[in-house]
Image (spheres, grey):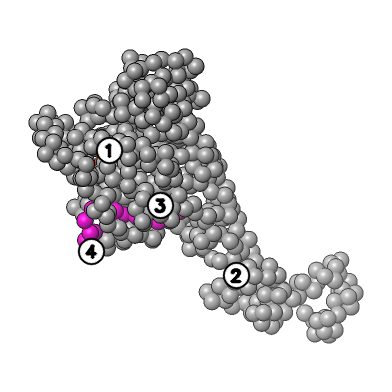
Amino acid sequence: MRYVHLYGHDAFAKIKQAMNSPRTTAQLKNRYVHHLDPKLDKSPWTEEEEAEFFRLYSETQDLEKVQRMMNSRRKMKRGYTYVVTLLSICLIYAGSLYFVSKTTTASYPVLEKDEIIIEDTLSESCTINYTTMEPDVIKREKAVIVILVRNNELNPMRRTLREFEDRFNRKFNYPYVFLNDEPFSDEFKQSISALTKAEIEFGLVPQAMWSVPGHVNETLMHHQLDDYASRHVMYGGSLSYRHMCRFNSGFFYRHPLLEKYDYYWRVEPGVHFYCDLDYDPFRFMKENGKEYGFTITLKEIPETIPTLWEHTLKFAHEKQLNTTLLRFFGSPEGGYNLCHYWSNFEIASLNLWRDPRYQDYFDYLDSTGNFFYERWGDAIVHSLAAGLFLNKTQVHFFEDIGYKHDNFAHCVNDGIFGKCMCPEDVGNFDEMFGSCLSDWKSFRTEGLQWDFRKNGDQIVEGRAIHNKKFAL
Ligand SMILES: Nc1nc2c(ncn2[C@@H]2O[C@H](COP(=O)(O)OP(=O)(O)O)[C@@H](O)[C@H]2O)c(=O)[nH]1
Ligand SMILES: [Mg+2]
């Protein structure tokens, strides 16, 4: 300091000489400028100063410039060290997320580093806007969470939504569309809106999508409903259940609120989600050419679908379809093996259903009136449509999404990572009687060719079997 007073603070060569110092002139100057200069401001940094520093540094990446812009007498290195530390924490966190997910998710990587939403998972300090790590850089797909629900299902809906948000959507903020055949109550809307920051739209199902079509004989329909009720077939006597199944089979994807989307995740009130999901399943679907995704596959109650399989084959003959996946649903003894993807969980392409080929299939099924005379479920309709129009590779088993609907659960054991845990009293249905999962897993990837001809021929892997019942 004495020599600085003597020679001034621009003369470090002279000062070095006078001190007979082994240090370089740059070292001496640095020591003075950053530590010894009495004009240095060493008081604690205020929050405003720190924020200003981060903002300017993220713009310029130049400490000296920041110092000039802030007109500061502070040691800018302190702010710089802070930035580097924060970046390291965020990158280590991102890296560990990547590592853990890579080792635990079935086949798909987690978010890339620059897409990770730090905001929700790390302390506030990682949300400062000095990098591109902002929630709004997330490249969301044109996808939506679709929920058909009644006002009186608010409580189970809220419980499900809490889990769904915690396990998945608070990281991605995919929009929701809630649908109802009656207007949603204000209480419903407010209580749901409180649970998420994602966009929500509440929509009414148009009457045309929720009514008995003119060609259905209502006297016969009511007779059938009574008969089903007397036989205690589940939901057998319910008309509203039939509206729901028909709506989910042939209309939901045409609802105006879904027009702008390509993919959907169907969720129901009361279901449970048991795994943290750190990647975007919609992106997975898109990038891997997947059209339909499920978690549980099981057998249907036969009484609900006495003629659906035959009608499906009739349609296949009429349209001369070449199929590879339909055989998965065929029983070795002939007929339908009752397996289907359980549609209370679906991650799928809306365009799959918007395809005129599917529309024709639905219109044909609807023309039979059997959504009402029988009790055809949308799960069977969707599954057999997948059989008609898709290959096995286009259907994805979301093995890594632990899930429960009613008494059936798909549990995931991810060992030490613990991102997935079914409650102790919940068993895994995958291996139980009634599950079709092992059949699904062993079904050949390339499928088995079943081609249908108008003359009633069914070509089974090159061999013709004639059935005059289907000759047109
Ligand atoms: N708005 C409305 N939603 C319904 C109606 N019936 C069923 N749902 C919804 O449709 C889905 C399937 O119904 P659910 O009773 O769970 O049938 P299950 O899953 O086959 O036992 C659920 O999301 C229900 O909330 C109805 O009459 N109105
Ligand atoms: Mg349900």
- The circle drawn on residue 367 is 1
13 in magenta: no
Q: Position of residue 169 (x, y in %)?
A: 41, 52
In front: label 1 or label 3? 1
Q: CA distance from mark 1 to mark 2?
A: 65 Å
Residue span colored magenta: 172-188
The residue pinned by badge 2 equals 54
Name the quadrant of the N terminus.
bottom right
**Mark 1 or mark 2, whichever is nearer to me:** 1
Q: Nearer the viewer, residue 65 or 20?
A: 65
Q: Badge 1, how many Cα within 10 Å: few under 14, some, many 20+? A: few
Residue 176 drawn at (x, y percent): 36, 55
Relative placement, left or right, of 157 versus 416 is left
Residue type at mark 4 is Asp
Considering only vertical position in the picture, is 466 above or below 307?
Answer: above
Quadrant assignment, res 233: top left
